[in-house]
Amino acid sequence: MSKPLNILFVTSEAEPFAKTGGLADVSSALPQMIKELGHEIRIMMPRYGTISERKFKLHDVIRLREIPITIGAETRVAHVNSSFISNLKAKVQVYFLANKDMFDRPGMYVHPTTKKDYEDNDTRFIFFCRGVLDTLKLLGWKPDIIHCNDWQTGLIPAYLKTTYKNDPFFKNIKTAFTIHNLAFQGVFPAASFDKTGLPGSEFTMEGVEFYDKLNFMKAGLMYSDVITTVSEKYAQEISTTVEFGCGLEGVLQQRKSALHGIINGVDYSIWNPETDEHLENRYDIKSLEGKAANKRELLDKFKLEYNEHVPVIGMISRLADQKGFDLIKEIADDALKMDIQMIFLGSGEKKYHEFLESLRKKYPNKVGIEFGFHDELAHLIEAGTDMFLMPSQYEPCGLNQIYSLKYGTVPIVRATGGLDDTIQDVEGANGTGFKFKKYESKELLKAIQRAVKAFGDQKAWLKIMKTGMSKDFSWESSAKKYISLYRNLLK
Ligand code: ADP
């Protein structure tokens, strides 16, 4: 058997500590699976003020109480807290890089009331990227691989190839960089470049410069040893089209041989109707009565009438353009002419809050809405709805459609990115959901109509549900693909 690897997994969010989206799910489950497969892996993330010291039994790492971190001409001091993640079999150590000024705020990247990005996000994540490397050295734990995720960690590979290149501690460490969403790139004015402390020679097209600005994501793509993204289809979309490449398609073309698509898995210790801690009525593929009980409970919560013959369509999402709300807006009236109910959980852009609010006013007996981020309700919606809607413009992987499969909640999705890779249309053999290709509202409406019609045939519907429920997207096979990429880097 080959030697176990040492891996540092760097992320800006991880369940159960801090979450705005799918990155947090991945950053918790993937390291646990890698550890279960016999490797030493530790996580580093920012210590946001919202992470409860008591709940997570955070403690100071004594050796790491005063770490000076250079940002431009300034030095800021970090300290490190530590805790564990252990909802699966493996227990993974988590280090939190702490500095009150930087991270003790009500939001992670965005102010929760103004919805605006924090103005000093450049400084905050330069601090984080340099801090990760400085901490590692003080800790004296040398990983074989540093696995970075999304723009917040993008400068780490750049530092390793430049500023920290001659430091013997960092010699031979290889980097992997995963794109979870290419649309968020961390782009800042040219003046931010001085704060990075990177050599001036790196502010070019071959480096971190992007139309005369500093681009963190581009840094990750240019300097890492291997690049991954979270589905094969998305890997292909972002490297071949302007629509999906968000200006970085050229860079991805250039690095094509280093780019790999690996589909995200699911942590079935959290997302499984048989064991779901958030559900009073559990169920599985062999006994589905619990699902009906969840539907009743969910509709009660939203003061909507229960009828087993009326399909309920659910959606749990950031309220953002990406997620297809403009299409929903165009066809909502037509869709709601049918005998259906809809339940939305989400938060995000004001225009979509207003749209959903107006929809509820217009259809008080058919539409239920909850604004905000509510983990427990997300589980009940997965369990209590009949169909799950994800008409995304683009979707790197998407997790809710995969959760939906396990909960017997049939996905209606746009055939893009991970949605296309994980859902098979019922028109073919062994279909698990309803897909539409073109990003057009009438296409979405047709897919919903097909689903509603299919729901009328109970026996056929049950087959679709069960085909989905029997799918296995557990992390093991995807985690093994990451490990094999790590090993290739070390050859
Ligand atoms: P993205 O990362 O683009 O937001 P994903 O589908 O990959 O989309 O992951 C979203 C994750 O966040 C899922 O676990 C989903 O259940 C969760 N989520 C999104 N919005 C909410 C919300 N308002 N309340 C609770 N969970 C949410």
Image (cartoon, rainbow, N blue to C red):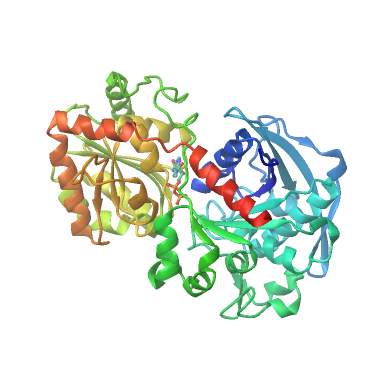
Whole-percent x, y for residue 153 in the image: 64, 58
Q: Residue furthest front?
A: 1
Please tell me whether residue 188 is drawn above or below residue 51 in the rendered image: below
Q: Horizontal placement of 456 versus 128: left or right?
A: left
Label count reads 0
Q: Quadrant of residue 109?
A: bottom right
Residue drawn 51% across and 67% down?
256
Q: Nearer the viewer, residue 321 or 84?
A: 84
The answer to whether residue 363 of the structure is visible from this angle is: yes
Taking the image in four quarters, ligand 1 sits in the one at top left
Whole-percent x, y for residue 231 in the image: 44, 53
Residue drawn 16% across and 33% down?
460
Q: Nearer the viewer, residue 396 or 260?
A: 260
Q: Horizontal placement of 283 versus 35: left or right?
A: left
Whole-percent x, y for residue 99 in the image: 76, 50
Please tell me whether residue 356 is drawn above or below residue 272 in the rendered image: below
Q: Horizontal placement of 154 versus 199: left or right?
A: left
Instruction: Say which quadrant the C terminus sits in.
Output: bottom right
Please tell me whether residue 251 is drawn above or below residue 411 in the rendered image: below
The answer to whether residue 349 of the structure is visible from this angle is: no
Instruction: Say which quadrant the N terminus sits in.
Output: top right
Whole-percent x, y for residue 357 in the image: 32, 48
Q: Nearer the viewer, residue 359 or 462?
A: 462
